[in-house]
Image (tube, helix red, strand yellow):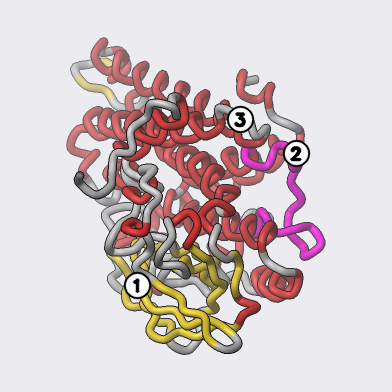
């Protein structure tokens, strides 16, 4: 038994094992036989519907949905750890699929905590009844993303997307990009500036916007280098009217979304960990199967050294991710620092793991049909997902030494 198993509940072990079986029996064979589908320029043709249907059967598409609406029950004080465990397992199969699924989980938590009962009933029931239905969280804009989290709470940092109050509702105008599930989702949580004279922490509101809302348009699918089974999208809102009841949170939406952001960092790190675990497993199998110079690759000292380094990095990342997840579950005072540490540490260390995997596979590592280069591509984009490395560093400093941390942004004197 692994030392990590000792900290898991029976329910978590059961869910992990079910996910592992799903990856080994469904995801891995699909990717092996259909590796070229990832490169389809028609996003609809990439991942077949049966993959989401199978994920639905084992209950992992709707984590975070309250049990009263048919969601999979999770232990409240273990929820983020459970998200991390399942995220790692699914990303071990494919990080794009993991990203596709976890957007549902995170937005479900947001709706569970902030939406009124009518919206919860409508959208949770829709999510539960349609295996292809996806949620998306639309915050990032062409003007800025990670830089908005530098502690610069001023009107200059406010959203370009704006919502103006009118009789019976709000009119939203703006553009969102780099949105996970943005191309495919049926329901979006859109963030907009509703008080131009205030800082972003007091003047940003969030809205529930169904895909078929007049004035809302999915402008394009962003073709990414990795995680290509999650269709990243760009959104356009032109005089988009939403009724008053679709206002999710007025003014303090970014503060309230903390219930989404911290678990999101953990999930991001855990997905990255799954990529590293896959690279480690595939490389360990390869070096113990292929011979060069009359002996198995693993018997060459340089190969053994690199493999040991990969295993150490993966284990270190897992330790930090699980400790950070526990801190978020417990609402510990060091949760903010730890969740950012785990995100940035995983993004850097797992990229090194995948680089070793590429090099130890030699020429095979560069072959599209082998699958190692895919892991390298997937790992490379985690450096800037859910905040860049540098912005994450600034947030860590601010969490640890708030009295003396710099602002890092703002108008020149």
Number of other residues with Cα within 10 Å of mark 1, as a class: few under 14, some 14 to 19, many 20 or more: many
Tell me: 167 left or right of 292. right
Q: Determine contact: label 3, label 2, CB under 8 Å.
A: no
Residue drawn at point x = 67 percent, y = 54 percent:
64
The residue at which mark 1 appears reads as: 175
Circle 3 Cα neighbour tier, 10 Å, few/some/many (<14 / 14–19 / ≥20): many
Report if residue 32 lies within the magenta region: no
Q: Residue at x 66, y 72 (%)?
A: 123
Badge 2: how crowded within 10 Å, few (<14), some, or many (20+)? few
| Pointer 3 or 2: first along the chain | 2
Disc 3 to disc 2, how far (Cα)?
Answer: 20 Å
Q: Which element type, helix, strand or loop, lies under badge 3?
A: helix
The alpha-carbon separation of the residues under discs 2 and 1 comes to 41 Å
Q: Residue at x 27, y 18 (%)?
A: 303
Q: Residue furthest right?
A: 68
* Camera-side mark, 3 or 2: 3
Residue range in magenta is: 61-81
- Residue 258 location in percent, x, y? 56, 48
Which residue is at the far top?
301
Q: Secondary structure at mark 2?
A: helix
What residue is pinned by disc 2? 11
Comes first in the chain, label 3 or label 1:
1
The C terminus lies in quadrant: top left
Q: Is residue 350 above or below residue 153?
A: above
Q: Residue at x 24, y 49 (%)?
A: 411
- List x then y, in percent, for residue 317: 45, 27
Quadrant housing the N terminus: top right
């Amino acid at each position: 038994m692994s030392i990590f198993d000792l900290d898991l509940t029976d329910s978590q072990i059961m869910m992990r094992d079910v996910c592992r079986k799903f990856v080994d029996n469904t995801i891995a064979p699909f990717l092996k036989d259909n590796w070229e589908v990832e490169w389809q320029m028609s996003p609809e043709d990439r991942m077949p519907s049966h993959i989401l249907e199978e994920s639905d059967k084992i209950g992992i598409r709707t984590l975070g949905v309250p049990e009263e609406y048919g969601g999979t029950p999770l232990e409240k004080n273990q929820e983020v750890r459970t998200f991390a465990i399942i995220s790692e397992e699914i990303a071990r199969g494919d990080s794009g699929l993991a990203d596709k699924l976890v957007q549902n989980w995170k937005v479900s938590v947001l709706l569970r905590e902030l939406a009124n009962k009518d919206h919860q009933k409508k959208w949770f029931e829709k999510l539960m009844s349609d295996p292809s239905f996806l949620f998306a969280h639309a915050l990032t804009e062409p003007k800025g993303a990670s830089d908005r989290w530098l502690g610069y709470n001023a009107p200059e940092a406010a959203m370009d997307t704006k919502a103006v109050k009118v009789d019976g509702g709000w009119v939203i105008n703006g553009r969102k990009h780099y949105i996970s599930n943005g191309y495919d989702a049926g329901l979006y949580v859109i963030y907009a500036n509703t008080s131009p004279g205030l800082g972003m922490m007091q003047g940003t509101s969030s809205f529930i916007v169904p895909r078929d809302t007049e004035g809302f348009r999915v402008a394009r699918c962003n073709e990414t280098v990795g995680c290509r089974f999650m269709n990243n999208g760009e959104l356009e809102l032109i005089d988009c009217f939403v009724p008053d009841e679709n206002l999710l949170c007025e003014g303090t939406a970014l503060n309230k979304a903390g219930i989404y952001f911290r678990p999101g960092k953990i999930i991001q790190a855990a997905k990255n960990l799954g990529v590293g675990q896959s690279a480690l497993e595939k490389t360990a199998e390869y070096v113990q199967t292929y011979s060069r110079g009359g002996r198995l690759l693993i018997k060459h000292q340089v190969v053994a050294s690199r493999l040991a380094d990969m295993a150490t990095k993966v284990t270190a990342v897992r330790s930090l991710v699980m400790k950070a997840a526990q801190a978020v579950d417990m609402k510990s005072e060091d949760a903010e620092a730890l969740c950012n540490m785990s995100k940035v540490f995983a993004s850097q260390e797992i990229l090194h793991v995948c680089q070793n995997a590429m090099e130890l596979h030699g020429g095979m590592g560069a072959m599209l049909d082998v699958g190692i280069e895919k892991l390298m591509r997937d790992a490379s984009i985690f450096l800037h997902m859910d905040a860049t490395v540098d912005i994450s560093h600034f947030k860590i400093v601010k969490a640890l030494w708030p009295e003396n941390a710099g602002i890092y942004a703002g108008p020149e004197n």
